[in-house]
Amino acid sequence: MALNDSELDCNRSAVVTRSASQDRTIEVVKIVKQATPSVEKLRITVLVEDSVSMEKPDLIAKHGLSFLVEASAAGAISRILVDAGPPLDIALQNADTINADLREVDVIVISHGHYDHAGGLLKILERVGRPVPIAAHPRIFSPKFVCRPSLRFIGLEFDQSSVRSAKGVLLLGRNSVKILDGVVTSGEIARENAFEKAEGFWTVEDGCFIEDPIIDDQALFVNVKDKGLVVITGCAHSGIVNTVKHAQKITRTNNVYAIVGGFHLAKSNDERIQLSIDELSRVNPKSIHPCHCTGFKAIHRLAEVFKDCCKPIQTGDIIEL
């Protein structure tokens, strides 16, 4: 069998021979398919979310989000903090209450530069007490505003120098960052669906007050062995469908097992909610765990469509995959 170079699957390795008379043809002797990197187990602890069960009165619910993601592979556990919650130390207080030691965090991922997702970063770095990588988009420190009903600042009240002083090692990149085998950040997420737009947000760029597309919005993708892809979002300002499709594209994994986080549908009209659910139904995840900015109406519709597969999460909840 003869193949041109362009026809070789880049996910495979080939042992080849090349004849002198056919130097423009590759003769494939053996093709070995390489396994997609994965983790063996995944545990997600909700450190901060907008609500908390009455069964957990010692925990604090606050508008914002923070997940402690623990990925097990080859006998080792990597601890990734996805978002730091709102100011000042809500995530830290809740972590202490449930005995989650944030001093053991290996990497911090910031989904975007809004106060409710990154406001607690400095306090957490103070607790970690050592240099720790912080993967985020370069635009997380840009000015961020809403006008509801009047102009209000919703960005970060600290700058890069403050993070560095707290021993945070900023890894600011627009592209995907590998955290470990089977775990990557999204990088900038392609905005492909016309119905998924980031609206109502503002920033300042080149001396002009303009609408903010929140280009810094990112997510975390984890491939779990024998299960599939787990998509962990902050707010999904890029659109939850865009985020999931981007995950499938960059990981080359079509099997989406779970979607966890904010879907940013709380202020969306019925049409956008329905279009989002229709597209997610085609993806057919085994479980959906909406929270934070998803909104009651959207969560209710998700539960109607996905039934027992839809399991909303609150502060203190734990997901084990």
Image: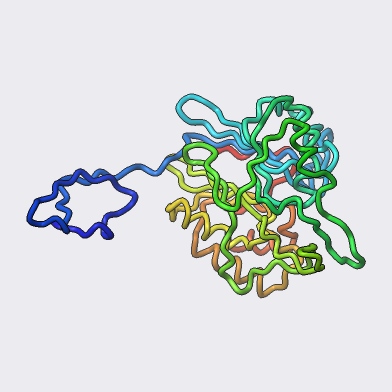
Query: Where 163 falls versus 100 (above or below)?
Result: below
Q: Relative to the observer, which residue lies in front, 126 or 223?
A: 126
At x 55%, y 45%, the residue is 177
Query: Where 53 falls versus 79 (above or below)?
Result: below
Answer whether residue 308 is visible to the viewer in this image.
no
Query: Where 230 falls versus 202 (above or below)?
Result: above
Image coordinates of residue 115 in percent, x first then y, are 80, 49
Image coordinates of residue 62 in percent, x first then y, are 83, 45
Q: Relative to the observer, which residue lies in front, 162 or 70?
A: 162
At x 59%, y 56%, the residue is 188
Q: How is the image coloured?
A: rainbow
Answer whether residue 310 is visible to the viewer in this image.
yes
At x 47%, y 37%, the residue is 181
Image coordinates of residue 46 in percent, x first then y, are 70, 40
Question: In the drawing, does residue 188 fall left or right of residue 249?
Answer: right
Quadrant where the N terminus lies? bottom left
Q: Quadrant of residue 105?
A: top right
